Amino acid sequence: MEKVVLAFSGGLDTTVCVKLLEEKYNLEVITACVDVGQGEEEIRKAEVMAEEIGSQKHYTIDAREEFANDYISKGIKANAEYEGYPLSTALARPLIAQKIIEIAEKENAKAIAHGCTGKGNDQFRFEAVILAMSDFEIVAPIRELNLTRSEEIEYAKNHNIPLSSDKTYSIDENIWGRSIEGGKLEDPSNEAPEEIYEWTESYENAKDTPQKVAIEFEEGIPIAIDEEMMGLIDLINKANKIAGSNGVGRIDMIENRIIGLKSREIYEVPGAKLLIAAHKALEELVLTKDEIRFKEYVSTLYSDLVYNAMWQEPLREDLDQAIDNMQQRVSGKVELKLFKGSIIPLTRESDFSLHDMEEISFEDKETDQREVEGMIKHHGLQAGKYQKLKR
Ligand code: ARG
């Protein structure tokens, strides 16, 4: 029998895929779960599920460091947010695909499989990488057999596939964020129930007193939180805790998917929201006005590329280089206040600050105020001529 490596999470889609790949495709299934920080419990769950379902071989690949240092860090430097969503799932997919390719090569497999449906974004993200970076065949059983979620549950029951607890929602989790979809959330006229949230407090239950937090950056990367230096993974985990307990980082949005569908999506991204807010606050101090305008534009472009499964697009690499160049001066410290879902910058300091306290001061006599008169006359020259004509 020929081998297929399945990107496996232990969730409904990928568990059903194991049986489908054996039964309908006649392939020997090797499952591989890429750890991008979905939590110890999820990783163990995937291992147990792989065993129970009879996967021939199961891999757990720890890709957390790579995810933080080569993907999330780029997201922070770019302030990457798609329609307000910090791209937690979108940033992880290319790395997961890359890791699955490595296993498929090692196992001499014929194909790579994933459990995505034909409606979402992740099928694009996985397949873009597999197509660009390998010659493996791609198998997408859920999409190819046009299965609905309830048909999958039915199939699981008929094939004695053990299903872990509640299958109402489709959840994706990694260090950078948590996404919850499906069930009653599909109808935007339904309020999202409190039970879906795990990383963030509601405004009502968030702390009643504001919390101050200090983030220090070096070349665009956060390196310390509240004066404590730590690696990016620990720092993000800590940022998630601090921001989440203050009700920061809940997103309930109508998102525009790649295939054009609008979909109601819920995210919990407390650390991402805090770190991006702090990063932007520091950029305001050290980048020029033109750099900031360019950065806003680049940020949208970058986020669209990441969201739209274009990680392999050379423009993404070009933008990373331009961003890295600017980030050389994004070093310093930002202090912020968190209170019931809001983030407010309090103080900013940097050796690269372009802010001149003396010149901006109302008490400054050094700068001759009269010098600006000529500038003003020329500043609105054409608008003035136009209005004169009209008059
Ligand atoms: N819509 C988001 C994205 O495209 C999240 C998808 C995550 N998948 C899930 N099953 N919750 O990045």
Image (spheres, rainbow, N blue to C red):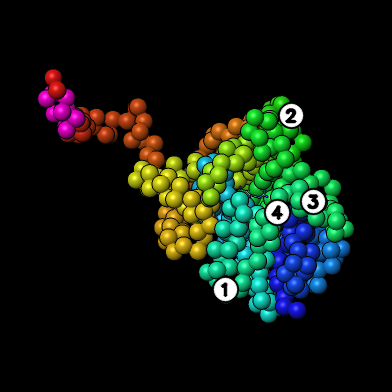
Magenta span contains residue 384: yes
Q: CA distance from mark 3 to mark 2?
A: 35 Å
Q: Earlier in the sequence, mark 3 or mark 4?
A: 4
- The image quadrant where one finds the N terminus is bottom right
The kind of residue on which mark 3 rests is Ile
Q: Nearer the viewer, mark 1 or mark 2?
A: 1
- The location of residue 292, given as percent across then percent down, is 40, 45
At x 24%, y 29%, the residue is 369
For residue 153, the mark is 3
For residue 134, the mark is 1
The kind of residue on which mark 2 rests is Asn
Q: Is residue 227 above or below residue 374?
A: below
The kind of residue on which mark 1 rests is Ser
At x 84%, y 47%, the residue is 165
Q: Nearer the viewer, mark 3 or mark 1?
A: 3
Closer to the camera in the image, 203 or 365: 203
Q: Earlier in the sequence, mark 4 or mark 2?
A: 4
For residue 147, the mark is 4
Q: Nearer the viewer, mark 4 or mark 1?
A: 4
The boundaries of the magenta stretch are 381-389
Image quadrant in which you'd find residue 372:
top left
Q: Secondary structure at mark 4?
A: loop
Q: CA distance from mark 3 to mark 4?
A: 10 Å
